[in-house]
Image: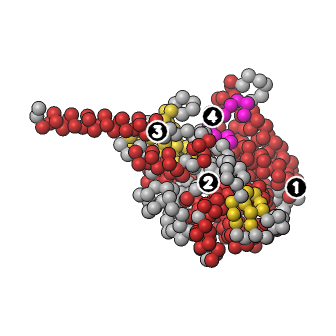
Amino acid sequence: MNSMSQITNTNKDVASTDKIKKLAVAEAFPFNPFDPEFHTDPYPTYNCLRSCEPIHRFKSFTGGNEWLLTRFADVKAVLNDSRFVVDDLPKRLKDKSFYLKQEGDFNTLTQTISKWLFFLDPPEHTRLRGVLSKAFAANTLESMRPQIQKIVDGLLGKVQEAGSMDVIADLACPLPAIVTASILGVPTEQHSELTQWAHDLFYVFDQPISLKDYEYLNKVALEFREYFSSLIAEREKKPLEDLLSYLIAAKSQGGKLSEDEILASCAMLFSVGQQTTENLIGNGVLALLHHPQQMQKLKAQPTIISSAIEELLRYDSPVQLISRLAIEDVEIGGETIRAGERIVVCLGAANRDPAQFPDPDRLSLTRQHYSLPFGSGIHYCLGAMQARILGQIAINTIVQRWDLKLNTNKLEWRKNASLRGLKALPVTFNA
């Protein structure tokens, strides 16, 4: 056998061995974001896929082939690459409504989310984000710190005497709802109802769900729109110093916004701001409970809270998965992503990539790094600054005020595929 034949055969053997390894990885660590065990701890699966098959091809629940990326460099590159666009979920929902067997459709749900920034590309995305971003500018949110601190103090004051609380129900859940409502100008008595709608509507990202569930989400979207339509009518007669009045003014100034876009934006701000902030606070407090030395470090050095929040966002990211669609063939890590194929970038895995973060499974509140907790590129989360500020104030306040202890042996995680968050986090403390 000549040397060229030996090389060829060796390459074939290597390729065959690599294929066997990939199949073994896929069988040992199947990617199923709806699996309760995966919800409990997705990081072993991420670690294995990242090290053995970082460009992972898997069969989606709709029957098609999709790609999962788990390396930091790949995830960041895709999120900043114009050859990958947002997944056109509104169009797919519109197509699905054709198969409804009962009377009704998904038109209201489709109409609402089609105006969400997640599903828009330039120039519509640029125009709408430009209007909304003024209300979420850093200086605007920084000026709200005293108000936010007062809200947090009030929420913790309600559980002070009990010596116990559910961090989710008593703090993480109501806080973003109250703050977002305050920014928009929503009356206090509507917070609870809007919070529930926000939780429900975000499940539209978890594909696929049943037609019955879509019909329910369509009903939620309708309730959202009916409520804000009524509130818009009030603000048109009597404007206030709030975001809703500002958006109404933008509508009348050269048609910068339509009423449909205002209604969709209100639903988006509640749904997204609610879930990401709630999960940041819940996941963050849990991480500190599991790392008492880091908890004590924060208690002794409250000024490190900014870097602490960045590390907590990295360590257990509230947003885990983001979808994109290739509009042309793109090669990544030796694999070719074909035009029209869907790709899932895994922020949770990227933020534990040892190539980017030394000793990534260790929590270190003073770590210096750049992670991807809220995505990257033009679709970087509009409410990222709000989530950070609320997280800083909420977590620092509760850590400085009390010595917390976990009060359960079994934690339950929400069933969201794209987000990671607890249903409840019961703790006790010295009142």
Position of the C terminus by quadrant: bottom right
Q: Residue furthest left?
A: 2
Callout 3 amino acid: Ala
Of marks 2 and 4, which one's residue comes earlier in the chain?
Answer: 4
Residue bearing mark 1: 189
Label 4 and label 1: CA atoms lie apart by: 34 Å
Q: Is residue 206 magenta?
A: yes
Kindly state the secondary structure of the residue where label 1 is placed: helix
**Which one is closest to the eye, mark 1 or mark 3?**
3
Colour option used: secondary structure
Kindly state the secondary structure of the residue where label 3 is placed: helix
User: Whole-percent x and y of residue 130?
Assistant: 64, 57
Which region is colored magenta?
Answer: 203-213
The local crowd at label 3, few if under 14, some if 14 to 19, many if 20 or more residues have their Cα within 10 Å, is few
Q: Is residue 171 above or below residue 115?
A: below
Callout 4 amino acid: Pro
Question: Is residue 80 among the parts visible in the rendering?
Answer: no
Q: Residue furthest top?
A: 101
Q: Is residue 277 magenta?
A: no
Of marks 1 and 3, which one's residue comes earlier in the chain?
Answer: 3
Residue bearing mark 3: 28
Of marks 4 and 1, which one's residue comes earlier in the chain?
Answer: 1
User: Whole-percent x and y of residue 249?
Assistant: 77, 57
Question: Is residue 47 among the parts visible in the rendering?
Answer: yes
Res 318 label:
2
Callout 1 amino acid: Glu
Foreground of the two, 403 or 23: 403
Label 3 and label 4: CA atoms lie apart by: 24 Å
